[in-house]
Image (spheres, rainbow, N blue to C red):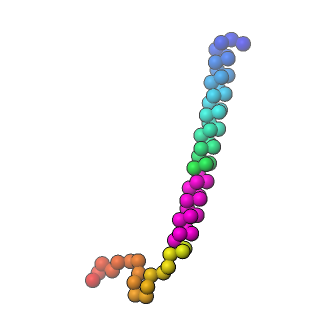
């Protein structure tokens, strides 16, 4: 095998490894974001409702 072929094979292997690492990082980030979203939803669900006559929307027409 020539040096050029060996270099091409090594570069191809390195590119494949890099692609796999990027895909794993993306999947890890996706799972972490899913966990954050789930925690945020559970926090929102545990908040008590606003008292009667008080809402979350501000009436700007007054």
Residue extending furthest toward the left: 62
Relative to 10, say whether 60 is above or below: below
Q: Residue at x 63, y 28 (%)?
A: 14
Position in image of residue 32 (x %, y %): 58, 54
Q: Quadrant of the C terminus?
A: bottom left
Please tell me whether the stretch drawn in magenta is mainly helix, strand or loop: helix
Relative to 5, say whether 43 is above or below: below
Q: Residue at x 65, y 33 (%)?
A: 17
Relative to 24, say whether 43 is above or below: below
To which quarter of the image does residue 51 belong? bottom left
To which quarter of the image does residue 12 belong? top right
| Residue 34 lies in the magenta-colored region | yes
| Residue 1 lies in the magenta-colored region | no
Residue extending furthest toward the top: 2
Residue extent of the magenta highlight? 30-44
Position in image of residue 1 (x %, y %): 72, 13
Q: How many marks?
A: 0
Position in image of residue 30 (x %, y %): 59, 52
To which quarter of the image does residue 18 belong? top right
Of 52 and 8, nearer the camera is 52
Left or right: where does residue 37 sit relative to residue 51?
A: right
């Amino acid at each position: 095998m020539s040096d050029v072929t060996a270099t091409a094979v090594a570069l191809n292997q390195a590119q494949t490894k890099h692609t796999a690492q990027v895909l794993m990082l993306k999947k890890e980030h996706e799972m972490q974001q899913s966990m954050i979203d789930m925690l945020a939803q559970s926090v929102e669900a545990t908040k008590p409702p606003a008292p009667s006559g008080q809402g979350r929307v501000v009436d700007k027409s007054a």
